[in-house]
Image: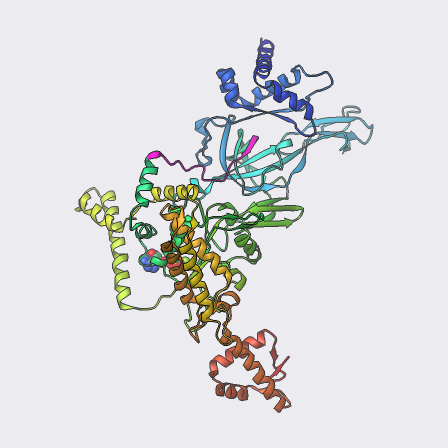
Amino acid sequence: MAQAQNQELTERFIQFYRNYYRDAIGQLAQKYPNEQRSLYVDYDDLYTFDPDLAEDYLSQPDQLREYAEEALRLYDLPADVSLGQAHVRLRNIPDSIDIRGIRVHDNHVGKLVSVQGIVRKATDVRPKITEAAFECQRCGTMTYIPQADGSFQEPHECQGCERQGPFRVNFDQSEFIDSQKLRIQESPEGLRGGETPQSIDVNIEDDITGRVTAGDHVTVTGVLHIEQMKQGNEKSPIFDLYMDGVSITIEDEEFEDMDITEEDKREIIELSNHPDIYEEMVASVAPSIYGYDKEKLAMILQLFSGVTKHLPDGSRIRGDLHMLLIGDPGTGKSQMLSYIQNIAPRSVYTSGKGSSSAGLTAAAVRDDFGDGQQWSLEAGALVLADKGIAAVDELDKMRPEDRSAMHEGLEQQKISVSKAGINATLKSRCSLLGAANPKYGRFDQYEPIGEQIDLEPALISRFDLIFTVTDQPDPDHDSRLADHILRTNYAGELHTQRTRMPRSNFTAEEVDAVTEEVAPEIEPDLLRKYIAYAKRNVFPTMTPEAKQTISDFYVDLRAKGADEDAPVPVTARKLEALVRLSEASARVRLSDTVEQEDAERAVDLARSCLQDIGVDPETGQFDADVVETGQSKTQRDRIKNLKQLIAEIEDEYEEGAPVDEVLERAGEIGLDRSKAEGEIEKLRRKGEVYEPRQNHLRTT
Ligand code: ADP
Ligand code: MG
């Protein structure tokens, strides 16, 4: 009876292949086994052929797959071809499930399911033994033991002499298959309000291994299994979920989860025509944080981003904007950064210290993710945020490994990993929104920014905009800030009281009125859609007026610094930043052209940032060197002079230049004592002067 049913099922599949997959199988037969080892079956085809069969395939995938593969072997092929080990891989099954939604009582276990996500981690592809040949060292007989997942099975006794070995595994006679393990994590756009992304591990074998890499967005179809966890050697009552992958499809990285309806579209276009759309946008970013209108505008522009340009020579200019907030503690930086998650269609929020072994960029790591201590490639924040925003708090605390990889990540927008045989280039086409504290905790207004942050100048220069946030008492500002914070908190109190205490004296209307005042102007949900819509559909180009505005600003700034031997004020990097900012500004209006007003908006932002940081604190001149090398020209001159001075003085004394004398003469050339002491210390640290004996200096 069972026999007959099996045969019937196999026959059904053969019939199905004849109707739908004649050509595909012909092709497979030609390429088997070297170039192709799988027949891909589309679920819809199977469903059209026989809905019951298709549904059975979902609920009993392991059994049905055997019949499907048996049918493939029995299929009428040219005499010289056999598809002995060919796989049947079903794909495009209906309804993918959420990784976080996988539950035992939903009866997903043992079923064919599909999940969408991003490859967080991937092991190297390694051979896995599927059947081990044990050669008896006494009589030479082979004992074959099929190997399943889990531990390595050895024979109890030799099939020849029936003794307990010893055995040696004969590799030539054993069978191996390529295997790989992947960790699929929920896509960043599926997450709301700082949820921790969940993941599921997937085992894959043979021809589908080595096809995807960390950072790829994929749909994985596979059979869901449970596996008992262990605590040391004890079995635990808790089980873990994993999948045996049947097929993997790489998805287009656009915002796949973002459904924009016709109704949304109408609303977006209507909004884009508001004359005060920029103010409305600004009022929709972190409304609980008072002030920071420039920073918030910049964040909006960053969300919309400039246009990625592909040049005829094949090169590309990034459209993504990077920006950095450096400032005193307790000024709301972290709050602003984390708000990004509410409005960015795709974002990753993390701390520079990094919560995973991959850190901010990517890494080859060796841990117990694979079987044994296997190398795997793991994607960090900048890769996971590909085509979105990476909000990185405490950027100054990032790990040394990340620093060098960051340069490439930010400018070339890819990250290369080359270690332990793993050579990979991962995409990181994201915008970085960073926050950092000054080196010594708080800002010293009189020292150049470059010296006060723990990021190297080359990295700093990758940022399109750098905002400095200082926290200085100012009665006017402070009282408005206090007002704002108290009002926000009060709204929160009212809301909480109304929901938690049934006999609250406040009416719903009162709560609404107060809430209204502190609510974002545009609902976060709509704003996300707005941004996704603009990034998908709007690719503006510059008008002559816009070009002129940017060019004027740039030339003017350069000219300001060009007199005498003044420092170069701004480099061409700024020019590209201005273009990106203007394009983003046009996108906010859904405009296909970048108008003068957009260029002016960009110039305004750039100017205010430059004033905050690019200015040589001692001359008031714009000085790109401060930003890009971390030292202003005045300061470099001063250090040069001081070194010269030490050299002069040391000629006059046998045992080196006495420090007191140096300090006194430095005073005469306009360096006060404490500055000069600081500079001497710096020269010493750099090895440009040393102390042959106490309180005496010599140049090197
Ligand atoms: P930072 O990351 O800059 O050290 P936080 O974001 O942790 O600061 O902010 C500290 C606290 O101060 C937060 O609760 C924040 O809401 C509040 N705060 C700071 N500045 C502002 C502001 N301008 N408006 C509203 N709240 C603020
Ligand atoms: Mg903080």
Please give the name of the residue rendered at 67% of the width and 24% of the height, measured from the top-left corner.
Answer: 85
> 658 above or below 181?
below
Residue at the front extreme of this rendering: 544
Q: Nearer the viewer, residue 615 or 586?
A: 586
Image coordinates for residue 496, horizontal then vertical, percent: 26, 46
Colour scheme of the rendered structure: rainbow
Image coordinates for residue 243, horizontal then vertical, percent: 54, 32
Ligand number 1: quarter of image: bottom left
Magenta region:
246-262
Most frequent secondary structure within the magenta stretch: loop
Report if residue 537 is visible in the image. Answer: yes
Please give the name of the residue rendered at 41% of the width and 61% of the height, measured from the top-left corner.
Answer: 606
> 569 above or below 487?
below
Please give the name of the residue rendered at 64% of the width and 46% of the height, measured from the top-left corner.
Answer: 423
Residue 369 covered by magenta stretch: no
Image coordinates for residue 335, horizontal then vertical, percent: 37, 54
Hey, which quadrant is residue 501 in on the image? top left
Quadrant assignment for the C terminus:
bottom right
Residue 260 covered by magenta stretch: yes
> 455 above or below 60?
below
Please give the name of the residue rendered at 58% of the width and 16% of the height, measured from the top-left corner.
Answer: 13
Report if residue 332 is visible in the image. Answer: no
Quadrant assignment for the N terminus:
top right
Image coordinates for residue 138, horizontal then vertical, percent: 82, 30
Q: Nearer the viewer, residue 549 or 45?
A: 549
> 359 above or below 684?
above
Determine whether, in the image, residue 479 is placed left or right of residue 175: left
Count of labels shown? Answer: 0
